[in-house]
Image (cartoon, rainbow, N blue to C red):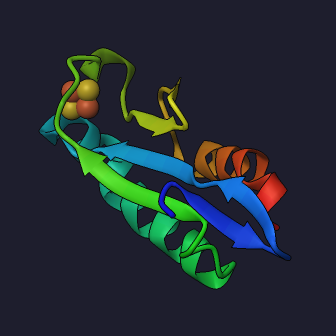
Amino acid sequence: MWPFHTCNNNLYMKTNITICLGSSCFSRGNNKNLEIIKEFISTRGLDAEVTFKGQLCSENCFQGPILIINGKTFSEVSKNKLIDILEKELNNHE
Ligand code: FES
């Protein structure tokens, strides 16, 4: 059924979250963002609704840390910015 999931017998597209794990993004914040995202997904019970994966450097290091949600790229993702992004982008799944 991937990339779909069901909720109340309705079919929904899964949310795809990709975090850059290249050395620049990783050292500039994605090392912590990685844990925050995992905790966010877990505490909200979104494991079945979210696909979370890492990617290698996409050569946008100067804009890092980079996060991509459903093909939309977020740059300079600080810890505070990350929570806002996750809450906004995953709002339909709560
Ligand atoms: S390390 Fe993330 S874009 Fe280069």
The image position of residue 31, as x and y in percent, is 30, 57
Residue pictured at 81% horizontal, 54% vertical: 91
Q: Is residue 48 above or below residue 17?
A: below
Residue pictured at 81% horizontal, 74% vertical: 9
Q: Is residue 33 above or below residue 29?
A: below
Q: Is residue 56 left or right of residue 68?
A: left
Q: How many marks?
A: 0
Residue pictured at 65% horizontal, 82% vertical: 45
Q: Is residue 21 above or below residue 75?
A: below
Tell me which corner region of the image, top left, top right, bottom left or bottom right, holds residue 85: top right
The image position of residue 81, as x and y in percent, is 63, 42
Q: Is residue 89 left or right of residue 41?
A: right
Regarding ligand 1, which quadrant of the image does it lie in? top left
Tell me which corner region of the image, top left, top right, bottom left or bottom right, holds residue 48: bottom right
The image position of residue 41, as x and y in percent, is 57, 71
Nearest to the observer: residue 74 or residue 17:
17
Q: Is residue 14 left or right of residue 32?
A: right
The image position of residue 90, as x and y in percent, is 72, 54
Assign the C terminus to one quadrant of the image.
Answer: bottom right
Nearest to the observer: residue 94 or residue 35:
94
Nearest to the observer: residue 24 or residue 49:
49
Residue pictured at 26% horizontal, 22% vertical: 61
